[in-house]
């Protein structure tokens, strides 16, 4: 029996904890297999306390006792955990909490903390993939609009933001000050030249049999009326107040025909990104495709919760790999890495 610890929640915010539970709940239902897996849930509350439970309802109903870190680690050790699956989307969850499991000697699915930190900083990720030959838009990191030397139209975003938070398309210089003030904080704002329409696609990669397998592309709705995707295109509150995903309906996203010429071009760029950033098990990259058909790197989103609604799971399903199999392959790769992963040169050639 494989004892799988699902790491859920967020020490940073209630919103991030809620988003984490949304995906984790779906994963637990989709991948349930009592003959193979014993799921254990470790939830981290926004105050940093842990709750070790067998059902998320124990967390949501506040029925599980809150534990400090030392007690939680002892409980995890006592449970004999085989492997950890991360469902955290905040920066601390993607880095510090994964590093904790490195220190505990418990393998986990997904990318290492250093890779997650690199991808989470859009400016650094851009520089790394550009060095690998991937096209990027001209851009600048600024704390104030007076530092900008590029001419509008420009896309302004937090350098470490997610879910299109504080994203803005600015067409004239007077509007830049407000956009930069909204996007900049302790860290700078990233200002990039706007890539005209075009298309916007996302490319997922999984490692299978020591090679990179590029999954079917997912395309997102952009138009003259809505030239960039903002936060409203991704998440919303249902009538009952619960958080739900937006981008999964046919009006917002669809799978690209594998015969479309854009697929091969984007696949090459995504492979380069995967290797350059040091990704492991899976990766996910957003590209803007300019009017000439050239993909331009936007950002890396290096997580997958193995929820049926997860982007990588959606792409894999379109490619004939159902989510339980995708999950099983990733768990096996984490437990026995030497049997499933080739070296970087082999992956780049695949």
Image (cartoon, grey):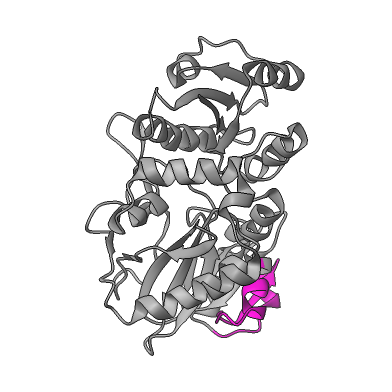
Q: Quadrant of residue 280?
A: bottom right
- Residue at (48, 53) in percent of width and height: 163
Which sits in the foreground, 80 or 251? 80
Q: Is residue 128 left or right of residue 266?
A: right
Q: Quadrant of residue 132?
A: bottom right
The residue at the far front in this view is: 339
Q: Residue furthest bottom?
A: 292
Question: Is residue 175 something one can see in this rendering?
Answer: no
| 254 relative position to 16: left or right | left
The verdict on residue 225 being magenta is: no
* Whole-percent x, y for residue 240 in the image: 29, 29
The residue at the point 42 percent across, 81 percent down is 265
| Residue in the image at 31% along x and 52% along y | 317
- x, y percent for residue 330: 50, 45
Front residue of 35/273: it is: 35
Magenta part of the protein: which range?
125-151
Percent coordinates x, y for residue 289 in the rendering:
40, 79
Give the answer, above or below, for where 88 lies relative to 47: below
């Amino acid at each position: 029996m494989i004892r799988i610890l699902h790491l859920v929640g967020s020490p940073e915010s209630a919103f991030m904890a809620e988003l984490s539970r949304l995906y984790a709940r779906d994963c637990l239902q989709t991948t349930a297999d009592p003959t193979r897996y014993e799921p254990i849930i470790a939830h981290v509350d926004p105050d940093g306390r842990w709750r070790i439970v067998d059902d998320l309802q124990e967390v949501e109903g506040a029925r599980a006792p809150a534990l400090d870190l030392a007690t939680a680690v002892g409980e995890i050790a006592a449970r004999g955990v085989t492997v950890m699956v991360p469902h955290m989307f905040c920066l601390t969850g993607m880095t510090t909490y994964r590093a904790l499991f490195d220190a505990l000697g418990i393998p986990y699915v997904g990318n290492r903390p250093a890779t997650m930190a690199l991808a989470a900083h859009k400016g650094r990720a851009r520089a790394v993939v550009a060095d690998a030959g991937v096209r990027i838009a001209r851009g600048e990191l600024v704390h104030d609009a007076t530092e900008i030397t590029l001419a509008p139209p420009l896309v302004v975003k937090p350098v470490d933001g997610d879910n299109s938070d504080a994203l803005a398309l600015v067409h004239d210089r007077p509007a830049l000050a407000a956009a930069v003030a909204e996007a900049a904080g302790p860290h700078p704002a990233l200002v990039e030249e706007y890539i005209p329409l075009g298309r916007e696609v996302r490319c997922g990669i999984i490692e299978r049999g020591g090679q990179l397998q590029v999954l079917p592309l997912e395309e997102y709705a952009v138009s003259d009326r809505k030239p960039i995707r903002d936060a409203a295109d991704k998440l919303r509150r249902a009538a009952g107040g619960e958080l739900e995903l937006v981008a999964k309906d046919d009006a917002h996203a669809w799978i690209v025909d594998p015969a479309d010429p854009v697929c091969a071009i984007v696949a090459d760029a995504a492979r380069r990104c995967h290797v350059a950033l040091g990704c492991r098990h899976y990766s996910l990259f957003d590209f803007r495709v300019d009017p000439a058909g050239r993909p331009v790197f936007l950002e890396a989103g290096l997580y997958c919760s193995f929820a049926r609604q997860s982007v990588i799971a959606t792409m894999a399903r379109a490619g004939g790999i159902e989510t339980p199999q995708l999950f099983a392959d990733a768990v096996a790769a984490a437990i026995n890495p030497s049997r499933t992963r080739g070296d970087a040169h082999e992956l780049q050639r695949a």
